[in-house]
Image (spheres, helix red, strand yellow):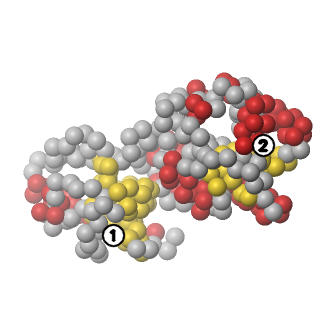
Amino acid sequence: MNTTEKREHTVIALGFFDGVHRGHQAVIGQAVELAARRSLLPCAFTFDTAHSAPSSKGELHALTTVEQRERELMRLGIAQVFCPAFESFRDLSGEAFVREMLYQRFGARALCCGRDFRFGKYAGCGVDDLERLCVGLGIELCITPEVMDGGEPVSSTRIRAALAQGEMDTVNRLLGRRYGFELEVVHGRRLGRQMQYPTINQLLPEGCALPRFGVYAAFAEIDGRAYPAVTNVGVKPTVKSDNRPVAETHIPDLAADLYGRVVPVTLVRFLRPEARFSSIEELRENIRRDTEHALETCKLYALQ
């Protein structure tokens, strides 16, 4: 993350941006458009909660890692992401946050945020305070309206709830893209290979929101091509494991050594809950059925 001082004049989109969902995308889009119009650098301000988090976030289970968040923001047109640790600025007053951090350190000449944006010590300031402070510094302020879906605002909370239920159509609609992860492929126990169903194994990040455990129709992207796949998310109930959640993805149309590579995997449909089987033979037969079901399902999503 780039948290170095920035002297070039900027437009900064403000927010935690967990998930970089459609509501966040509206704020980012406004910042990118404003930057182009005023010949400013489009930037985003977020923060790292690895060691501490705002009380409003509670026991935060993020939808995206810090790295994923940065990639998505830059994919949307952000040129630079400012991501200091939350504890490095949490005690700043609202005025000091705007004047010293945004205006002086990061060169803000315009800001974009949602109506619910809070800042300053104990999140004591809101957009009315931000407007007053911006007027005093000559900063242009744009408040982005909420993005609604089904009569309710799009929010990370709604997405986490749908993800926990395996409701991938809802998750992906609210995100504005397919939910997934980009993680390194690690060595497993090679049980799938012994059953003629080799998988890539990816350890899910600790502290992040988890999909409902079970089997999904999925796509794995290798060298720019999306391959239909079947992914099991869980803790390997039939095989002894250390109980750390893992995603195991079988890619029928690919035979390649992917160990050590970072492979994007997206989940498109929940197929069945995680289950324990009485034997390896029963497990093998279920993998076969899951693979057939997943490949048929992927055909429905291939052109979306």
**Residue 62: image location, x then y, percent:** 49, 42
**Horizontal arrangement in the rendering, residue 288 relative to residue 19 (left or right):** left
**Can you see residue 303?**
yes
Check disc 1 and report its element: helix, strand or loop.
helix
Rounded to the nearest angstrom, the CA distance separating label 1 from label 2 is 52 Å
Task: Indicate the amino acid at tag 2.
Answer: Tyr
N-terminal label among 1 and 2: 2
Viewer-side residue, 32 vs 101: 101
**Residue 173: image location, x then y, percent:** 56, 56
Check disc 2 and report its element: helix, strand or loop.
helix
**Residue 263: image location, x then y, percent:** 38, 63
**Horizontal arrangement in the rendering, residue 43 relative to residue 9 (left or right):** left
**Can you see residue 21?**
no
> What residue does disc 2 label?
103
> In the picture shown, does residue 215 fall above or below 137?
below
**Residue 211: image location, x then y, percent:** 40, 47
Residue at the image position 64 percent from the left and 32 percent from the top = 89
Residue at the image position 36 percent from the left and 47 percent from the top = 204
Residues packed near mark 1 inside 10 Å, few (<14), some (14 to 19) or many (20 plus): some
Eye-nearest disc, 1 or 2: 2
Q: Quadrant of residue 182?
A: bottom left
> Tag on residue 295?
1
